[in-house]
Image (cartoon, rainbow, N blue to C red):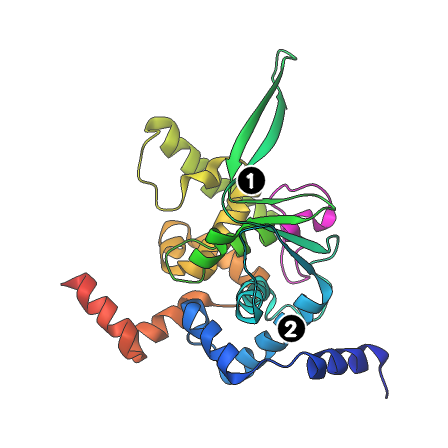
Amino acid sequence: MWSLKAWRRRRTLERNPVTPEQWAAVRQRLPILDGLDETELQHLRERAVLFLHDKHLTALPGVELGPVERLLLAVQAQLPLLHLGDLDWYQGFHEIVLYPGDFLSPQRHRDAAGIEHEWDDERSGEAWQQGPVILAWPGVESSGGWEGYNLVIHELAHKLDMLEGGANGLPPLHGNMRVQDWAQAMQSAYDVLNAELDAAPDAETAIDPYAAEDPAEFFAVTSEYFFSAPDLLADAFPEVYRQLALFYRQDSLARLQRLQVEHPDYQKVETATNG
């Protein structure tokens, strides 16, 4: 049966081809794609092209966006959605604004006494409810490795979190998931992290202490780690890893472990670490 949606999809892909050279350049800069099979990589490339067709990238002065840079961002944005089907997971926004560096974000907070505080907070990323995603380009370029940092995934995790209202650390779960299981895993780990920081504010925590800010940041940071340091996340909070694996329908830890066994570059890294 003929489908208008499928026809539009094919036409968009045909009109916006990715050259082998462009794809090779992106692959080289994104080690977190290592271990994906050819079908997954092809699907990811197509989803990235469709993402760039659907979203507008606004580059402020000082940010130079060529085809490879645009694709670099889009591929990272689509990696979390790779096995989530074609639903419009990134609905509610149409623009990504790219700053040449960290930016100041006006903040406002009313304390328990009713006093309102205002200040400018320096940030590398921000996601607004029903508004744009804002990213500092150096953070985008620094993402894509296995170091527990990915600005793109972090901010777009907030957008997933906001699909059913304000960001609270609970994105829309699949039918085979239980809210009780999610809440218990996330809240328990969040409490452990906060207790550790309460006891020693400068402690070297297993994951970025920014995750202790609030449940929304905990979900965004652990999503980062799920894709960029799954071994650290699974060691620290195995139940959180399990819930994220169910949500994203991926097993990034198994992929990393296969690479450490089979891929020469990862074997060298492992040997150097153990030595």
Magenta-span inclusion, residue 243: no
Q: What secondary structure is found at the residue carrying circle 1?
A: helix
Label 1 sits on residue: 215
Stretch of the chain drawn in magenta: 159-179
Which residue is at the far left?
A: 275
Label 2 sits on residue: 49
**Quadrant of image for the C terminus:** bottom left
Query: Between marks 1 and 2, how big is the CA–CA gap?
Result: 32 Å
- Identify the amino acid type marked 2: Val
| Residue placed most toward the observer, 241 or 62 | 62
**Quadrant of image for the N terminus:** bottom right
The spot of residue 23 in percent (x, y) is: 51, 78
Quadrant for residue 29, please give it. Answer: bottom left
Mark 1: few/some/many CA within 10 Å (<14, 14-19, 20+): some
Seen in the picture, residue 263 relative to 172 is either above or below; the reply is below
Residue at (44% x, 55% y) in the render: 225
Seen in the picture, residue 240 relative to 20 is either above or below; the reply is above
The spot of residue 82 in percent (x, y) is: 59, 70
Quadrant for residue 105, please give it. Answer: top right
- Identify the amino acid type marked 1: Pro
Residue at (69% x, 58% y) in the render: 90
Residue 18 visible somewhere in the drawing: yes
